[in-house]
Image (tube, rainbow, N blue to C red):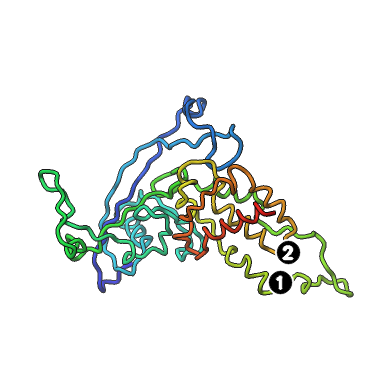
Amino acid sequence: MADGSNVTTVTVKVNRFTPRAERERDRARGGSPFARRKSPFGGSSDAPARRRPRGRQWVQEYTVPARPEDTVLDCLLTIKRTIDPTLAFRYSCGHGMCGSDAVAINGTPNLLCTATLKDWAKRPNPLAEADDDGFRHTGDADATDSPTDDTSLGVIELAPLPGFPVQRDLIADIDPMLDQIRKLKPYLQAQGTLATTTEGKVDVFEYLQHPEELAKYEQLSNCIACGVCEGSCPVFAGGDAFIGPAALIWASRFVNDSRDTQAMARMDAIDTADGVAACQSVRACTRQCPRGIDVGEEMWQIVAKVRER
């Protein structure tokens, strides 16, 4: 991570969680009888409600050497390797391509591997601290940007991705989102017959698209199903029954593909109470998409297509 040049420190506050072993009685009971029976991931009203995981929860602070250009993932790897091997988080490629390391950084869903300290470390304001009488001093504007320690980049707070069950520490269970994407058949459904040439070979030119046709879905094909848009959505993360923006983005990708023959069936599948009807057009899903997809705009477009078909 740090090579000794321009090295300072950063404090990482991690919301940690260790699950409690589930007892046989809890499994048989299936949660509180007063819990909402409406699944936050869609499905019938008989689907099991999302239960808050039980276990030990606490906030742990780590101070590690770092540079402004380091990523939050760099810091967590340093903690894991040199300070606390019990810290649990998920990552794979480390380059913003796999989407496996989505968490809430300072309350905002983002990828650990693309979030740099210079962009996300918060410099503490000493004048905002309460005095012995419980009052906070406001001070002047210049002082609010001054850290208490000149050698520190500041503080970063990490929590699991909102809207998903927590498995351990920063690891959230995103299987519900992936299941919803699978239900919408995220693969090309063409006629099933191959065009052939006079020699009996596959006529690949029959399946070429014009640039305008490709442009309609090319950006959508960049979705890596990281869950950032779902964690940012106040409807999905709030626990209401909603299929989620990620699944709708995948549906829109094939609805806009001129080669696909199931556009109407795809729109029928999402024209449900927990599908496009549940979208409130808040557009919070757009803010931090690591692949640059304007999720809010695409959501508006697919909702309009479903209603106009």
Residue at the image point whose x is 73% and y is 57% from the top: 189
Residue found at the far front of this picture: 308
Which tag, 1 or 2, sits closer to the chain's start?
Answer: 1
Amino acid, disc 2: Arg
Dots 1, 2 in contact, CB < 8 A: yes
Residue found at the far right of this picture: 198
Looking at the picture, how far across and down is residue 104, in whole percent?
39, 53
Looking at the picture, how far across and down is residue 248, in whole percent?
59, 53
Q: Which mark is residue 209?
A: 1
Q: Which mark is residue 29?
A: none
Residue at the image point whose x is 56% and y is 64% from the top: 222
Whether residue 29 is situated above or below residue 284 in the rendered picture: above
Image check: 239 left or right of 146?
right
Looking at the picture, how far across and down is residue 202, in whole percent?
81, 70
Image check: 294 left or right of 187?
left
Q: Quadrant of residue 47?
A: top right
Whether residue 141 is situated above or below residue 303 in the rendered picture: below
Residue at the image point whose x is 54% and y is 41% from the top: 241
Say how many tags the image has. Answer: 2
Residue topped by disc 2? 259
Q: Label 2's element?
A: loop
Camera-side residue of 59 and 110: 110
